Amino acid sequence: MKRRTFLHAGASASLLGALPRFARAADFDPRPGPWRYFDVTTRINVLRPSGVTRAWVPLPSLNSNFQRVIGNSWADSSPQVKVVSDPKYGAQMVYAEWPAATGRPQLAITSRVATRNRAVDFSKPDPAIRLGPADARFNTAPTALIPTDGIVRKTALQIVRDEKTELGKARAIYQWIVDNTFRDPKVQGCGTGDIRFMLESGDLGGKCADLNALYVGLARAVGLAARDVYGVRVAKSAFGYKSLGAGSPDITKAQHCRADVFVDGYGWVPVDPADVRKVVLEEPPGKLALDNPKVVAARKTLFGHWEMNWMAYNTAHDIKLPGSSGPVIPFLMYPQAETAKGRLDPLDPADFRYTITARELAA
């Protein structure tokens, strides 16, 4: 096995991260504070290789005021491992390739990141904060599963018909998602984000990649720049929400998609209506009413705040994996692999198995 030292992807920082305090859900008010540091390790195994085997593992690609990517390292059984990027969005991933008859392909990648909470102060707009025309066009464009015409635009116009400001429109769409959708535990993984199907069928159930994609599509349909942000939860919530954190160091099934909407005067505003519906369904004792205090607190907080017990991978859609002859994927939040027989299902451990673990670094 070859071992690679950390490749620095951002500014280096002290590893003396402050440990979270644990509070009541009623105090759900994440604010920027000290940076916290995490090592997130993804281990993959292709159990039944056939011919040439390839794998793509997402890396944290966002450097911002809420996340710093410190570096990545790996140990592998492949003669070819490198970091590649999606050319449109800049989503980074490790690409590995194993020739035929090389045994069971394996790969272990560790990413080190620093995170801190996000919060927008809506009482202090700054007229100088505006999105440039190119970025506005980019973040209002449709994607394969997030159209901005037809029933999507019709629905969005109905939602914002009484709103005159960008902030009012952004908030109205958020409230509509919370009121009209539901988290469906039967949906595999995080969902697919096919919002036209959701609206045309009237089935507004799903998981985070569905409900937050619906937010993004409705926002884009009325001219608000918005984006999905794909990632994974890395720690427990410091505010008493069992449903909004990783329950253990094993975060293999803790993937979570969030959303951002750009509002002039405030910049990128973090939102997460899908997590409000997750609180409704999953927060003990379960199936809470919308007027339950925990739900009310989450609803208030998750427009304008993110608790950063979560690591962001990327904001990419419709990704053609570099070096692959397989189909485009709607987003990159799970490891991917393919053999001579074709693309493997990242949610089916029969052929392709992976684990993801997180470890917080402290003094």
Image: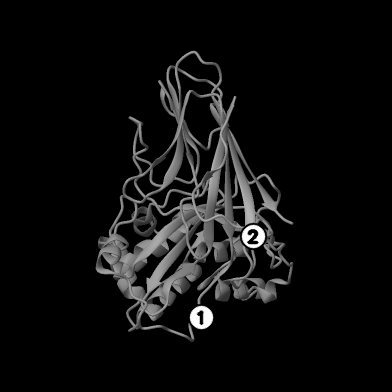
Residue 160 image label: none
Comparing marks 1 and 2, which lies closer to the viewer?
A: 2
Label 1 secondary element = loop
- Separation of disc 1 and disc 2 at Cα? 22 Å
Out of 313 and 352, give the one closest to the viewer: 313
Residue 302, picture quadrant: bottom right
Q: Is residue 36 visible?
A: yes
**Residue 255, image x and y in percent?**
55, 49
Counting from the top left corner in percent of width and height, residue 357 is at 64, 43
Residue 36 numbered mark, or none: 2
Which amino acid type corresponds to the residue marked 1 in the rendered image? Answer: Asp
- Single out the residue that lies furthest toward the top: 101
How packed mark 2 is, by other alpha carbons closer than 10 Å (few <14, some 14-19, many 20 or more), is many
Give the labeled residue for mark 1.
121
Q: Where does residue 290 sit, x and y in percent of width and height?
A: 59, 72
Is 248 rendered above or below residue 217?
Answer: above
Q: Earlier in the sequence, mark 1 or mark 2?
A: 2
Q: Is residue 59 left or right of residue 310?
A: left
Vertical position of residue 265 compared to residue 331: above or below: below
Mark 2: which secondary structure? strand
Q: Is residue 355 left or right of residue 22?
A: left
